[in-house]
Amino acid sequence: MKKGLLILLVILIGAFIVRLYKFNAPVADWHSWRQTDTSAVSRNFVKFGYDVLAPRFDDLSNGVSLIDNPYGYRFVEFPFYNILQAGFFEAFGRLTIEEWGRLITIFSSLGATVFLYLLVRKHISARAGLLAAFFFSFVPYNIYYGRVILPDTSMVAAFLAGLYFFDNFLDAKGIFKKFIYYFLAIFLVSISLLIKPFVVFFFLPFLYLIFMKYGIAGFKKPEIWIFFISSIAPFLLWRMWMQNFPEGIPRNDWLYNGNSIRFRPAFYWWLFAERISRIILGYWGLPFVVLGILLKTGNREKLLFFTFIVSSLIYVHVFATGNVQHDYYQILIIPTLAIFFAKGVDFLLGSKEIFNRFVSYLTITVGTLFMVAFGWFGVRDYYSIQHPNLIVAGLAVDRLTPKDAKIIAPYGGDATFLYHTNRKGWPVFDRTFKDFKMGGASYIAFADPTQDELNLEKLFKPVRITSTYAIFDLNQPTAEGLKEQKKD
């Protein structure tokens, strides 16, 4: 036991270190649009106070909800993540608010690793638990998403912890222990649902554990009903409250099957070949996962972890377009892959009578190294900043315009550029200058301006024009600009 905990500690230290790669890089990497939306809510908590029931980000356009959003409301997940990010930034400083966001995700990832280990150790073996922890810690896909400014890893950590404590509640003997495990489970599962309701697809393991403990009679027990009602109620209340702010609720109907891809060959290619096989498993991890699925279950495990497979399959099929469109949607299925990778490798390590021991160890070593290496090739560009002038232009806007100015920072609806201006405004040019000014816009900025964009110099006085950015003052029109405004 002590040896296993020591190995786990080494895994956690290694997991922490690799997640520090490009820790202080600007938020302009892969999926920066979603990261900056998240971080903007936290930054606005710092600027304007912790109005957790009316979180706001910087985007005032109608691109998210198709309704004008002049106050910048942002209603997606309940802002637990943002409260922590802003709170630690204000309490301790030193790091930037973006670095605090990454640190919260890193520690969420470490917490998820611990509870994944505990679950697998309890139901399979300590060695399998360590193997699952290793996979979760060092698969390059999960390294990247274990340090981005997104709440999804926190959701996974809360779900795994909630399942672990619920499992312990069912097995506990003393009343006090049962009480503690019960309320910890309720608290953590409710948090996971408030962060992302996708966790509801993974209620199947809870149902399985209840059935295995009590049979059908378990679903008649009041404490079981109280558990599910108490876990779901905060999420339902949050969703009801959100309806008061329709302009801040992103459209989400397209996530299900918006492009009609579900059950089509392209869906399975994108999800199972491109994402799971190539990017996550680096090709070479797939045989270990398949072996883990094919193996007979042990007496302790029974079918518990197969409910993870069913839950994962239901989840990716229900949110078919979302899973194809955004690879971070697969964060939720990483524990499933980790468990069955661990089962497959654990079997090879223990099959001295079936396989040559040296060949087994060599196969595991080479396969794991190739999995990590090829997985790295799949995600290494995720860390790259493809448009560094967005940051340069954003810093220039922050330096050269008033702090309360509202900015038009067009970048195809992506708010990354807007975020780096440290201002509220519009990330897309979706209306006339007259309408922008009525909404409070006072400047327009471009990164890597085109000749057409530079031609705005004929309409508005430039604040600064360089080869990398251009900023124009909408409140100082030229003579030609005044003529155009009269036409409008």
Image (spheres, rainbow, N blue to C red):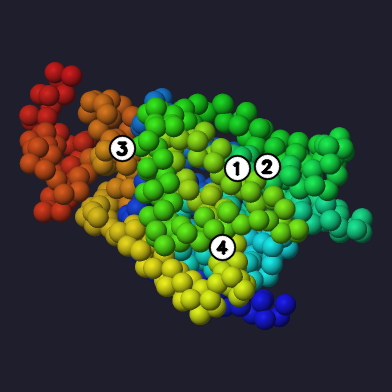
Q: CA distance from mark 4 to mark 1?
A: 18 Å
Residue found 15% across the figure and 54% down from its top: 468
Closer to the chain start, of discs 1 and 3, is 1
Q: Tell me the number on the disc at residue 436.
A: none
Residue linked to disc 3: 413
Which residue in the protein does label 4 denote?
A: 344
**For residue 111, side relative to residue 426 (left or right):** right
Compare marks 4 and 1 and give the one earlier in the sequence.
1
Residue position marked by numbered label 2 in the rendering:
204
Q: Are marks 4 and 3 in contact (CB under 8 Å)?
A: no
482 or 85, which lies in front? 85
Task: Measure how far apart labels 2 and 4 are at the Cα level.
Answer: 23 Å
The quarter of the picture where the N terminus appears is bottom right
Residue 315 in percent (x, y) is at 54, 39
Mark 4 to mark 3: distance in Å? 44 Å
Q: Nearer the viewer, mark 2 or mark 4?
A: 4
- Count the marks: 4
Three-letter amino acid code at the position of disc 2: Leu
x then y, percent, for residue 307: 65, 46
